């Protein structure tokens, strides 16, 4: 096989990174939904002819790490490469084959250059509406929406009319979902055109030699980082709020040379409510946590995760059997990083963070568009406080482990009969410590329309707030209110005209002993309004 020089590898790698980001911008600029256009809840990936992911757009969410190559394997079982042509695009949203729930649609297109198959370009994007009647009380995945089996959405460059008709018949806002699907088609065209130009200019016939080298280098980089940690098995247990009772997540991290095994044996069994995390999602957030802690600067590709093995008993909260409800799989999957960091905290305290105010909080608003007599379904993301870091405070309202972007308030208000009356940081909500956890935020929405609006929430860290680490204090718990009255954190309610719903996200956990916090930092906290003088005196013994 052709050997490429390190210089050539570096040049091609930087060009591919730029190419993937350009392709991602094509999606953003042509998308119909705010969840893609503003929240960046999507990813673009490039895979080689053997189905190994080489590169991924940098503006994407961790939910999609490593899932595309696994989804492609399932797709190729149904459509082997000899049954694919240049104009075909495959599609599925199966939660066990893709990213864990029906709202993420994966599409992959084979790339042919001069009649020869050289790889694949794929994308994953979140759609707010996938039909069905998703709710916090769903008892199986059939209630949660339309499951698109592995199919072809494009056949020889032409849309599959039957599949498009099925989508039109099952979605409340088909023009938005189909618009996002078609925006991916334009992105694929941009990718293939520019990729082929890159190969021509770099005098490469295909991606195979480059792929082998980059994947091996990525693997070696993480192995070096793992090898610096002492061998052994390290454990942690954290508690999720659950529904009618709390749910324990057990995590053990075993270091053996340059290999790392993350095992969730002992975790609570799957439940009949939609908080179960399919193994693809559990793997994605486990790998992401390790990458962030040990080797954050190297490429995200399949090679980077070769040293990591993630296991969980089938039938548990983090590896459920079909047809478990999985709509809110982040309500358990987002606990993977804090569980792993809790296990690593005593042997690698300089590489981890305290618990953040996540799982990510989001809200579904559903109703009728006034004057148009058609439905709307919109989602709004909000972040709790970030956990304290080894040498710095945690930022307020910064999302981790998910990294979705904020949506412009004005854009949201333009799409719904809702007015955002308040969006503010809440004092005294970050965990105390040598380094303080990030503050919570509070948002209030008022229904200014004439018709009721249905509000669906699935929130965690209400009964079990984010933990502090290494002597740091816990952050504040979350809070959900309608007209000032507390409501269940996983519930569905109707807002009548002029009703208000208020959400206060959790605060991040602190890190380190509070008595070690610098007095200058406490004074700054008070001056900025993040900590009150009363709390500073009580928690730190500080008086101005």
Image: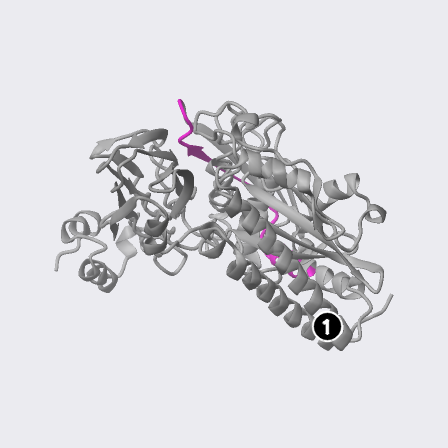
Which residue sits at x=73%, y=42%? 75
Q: From this viewpoint, which residue is outermost toward the left?
A: 544
Which residue sits at x=76%, y=71%? 199
Q: Position of residue 28 (x, y in %)?
A: 52, 59
Asked if residue 307 shows in the view, the reply is: no
Q: Nearer the viewer, residue 47 or 222?
A: 47
Q: Nearer the viewer, residue 304 or 101?
A: 101
Reading the image, the residue beneath label 1 is 197
Q: Which residues are magenta?
A: 220-244
Q: Position of residue 39 (x, y in %)?
A: 45, 53
Secondary structure of the residue carrying numbered label 1? helix
Q: Nearer the viewer, residue 203 or 318?
A: 203
Q: From this viewpoint, which residue is outermost toward the right?
A: 1
Residue 229, magenta (yes or no): yes
Q: Is 89 on the left-hand or right-hand side of 398? A: right
Residue 512, magenta (yes or no): no
């Amino acid at each position: 096989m052709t050997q490429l020089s390190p210089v050539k590898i570096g040049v091609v790698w930087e060009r591919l990174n730029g190419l993937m980001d350009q392709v991602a911008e094509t999606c953003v600029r042509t998308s119909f939904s705010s969840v893609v256009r503003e929240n960046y809840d999507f990813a673009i990936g490039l895979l080689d002819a053997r189905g190994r992911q080489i590169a991924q757009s940098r503006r994407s969410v961790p939910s999609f790490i490593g899932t595309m190559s696994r989804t492609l394997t399932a797709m190729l079982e149904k459509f082997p490469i000899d049954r694919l042509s240049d104009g075909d695009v495959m599609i599925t949203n199966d939660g066990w084959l893709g990213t864990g729930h029906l709202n993420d649609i994966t599409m992959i297109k084979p790339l042919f250059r001069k009649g020869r198959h050289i790889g694949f370009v794929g994308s994953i994007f979140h759609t707010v509406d996938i039909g069905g009647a998703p709710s916090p009380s769903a008892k199986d995945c059939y209630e949660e929406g339309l499951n698109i089996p592995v199919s072809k959405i494009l056949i020889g460059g032409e849309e599959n009319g039957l599949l498009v008709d099925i989508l039109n018949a099952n979605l409340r806002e088909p023009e938005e979902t189909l618009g996002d699907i078609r925006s991916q088609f334009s992105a694929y065209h941009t990718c293939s055109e520019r990729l082929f130009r890159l190969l021509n200019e770099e005098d490469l016939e295909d991606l195979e030699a480059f792929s082998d080298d980059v994947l091996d280098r990525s693997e070696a980089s993480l192995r070096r980082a793992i090898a610096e940690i002492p061998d052994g098995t390290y454990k942690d247990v954290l508690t999720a709020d659950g529904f009618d009772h709390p749910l324990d997540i057990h995590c053990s991290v075993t270091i053996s040379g340059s290999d790392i095994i993350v095992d969730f044996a002992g975790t609570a069994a799957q439940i009949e409510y939609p908080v179960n995390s399919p193994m693809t999602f559990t793997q994605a957030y486990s790998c992401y946590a390790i990458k962030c802690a040990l080797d954050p600067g190297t490429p995200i590709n399949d090679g980077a995760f070769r040293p990591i093995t993630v296991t969980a008993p089938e039938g548990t909260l983090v590896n459920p059997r079909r047809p478990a409800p999985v709509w809110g799989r982040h309500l358990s999957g987002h606990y993977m990083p804090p569980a792993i960091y809790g296990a690593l905290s005593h042997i690698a305290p300089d590489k981890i963070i305290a618990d953040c105010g996540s799982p990510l909080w989001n809200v579904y608003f559903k109703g009728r568009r006034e004057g148009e007599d058609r439905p709307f379904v919109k989602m709004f993301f909000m972040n709790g406080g970030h956990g304290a870091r080894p040498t710095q405070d945690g930022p307020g309202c910064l999302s981790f482990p998910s990294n979705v972007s904020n949506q412009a308030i004005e854009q949201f208000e333009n799409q719904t009969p809702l007015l955002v009356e308040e969006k503010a940081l809440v004092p005294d909500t970050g965990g105390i410590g040598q380094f303080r956890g990030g503050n919570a935020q509070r948002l209030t929405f008022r229904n200014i329309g004439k018709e009721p609006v249905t509000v669906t929430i699935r929130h965690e860290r209400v009964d079990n707030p984010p933990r502090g680490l290494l002597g740091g204090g816990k952050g504040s718990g979350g809070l959900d209110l309608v007209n000032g009255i507390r409501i269940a954190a996983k519930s569905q309610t109707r807002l009548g005209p002029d009703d208000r719903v208020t959400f206060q996200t959790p605060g991040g956990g602190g890190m380190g002993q509070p008595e070690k916090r610098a007095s200058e930092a406490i004074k700054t906290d008070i001056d900025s309004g993040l900590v009150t003088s009363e709390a500073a005196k009580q928690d730190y013994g500080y008086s101005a």
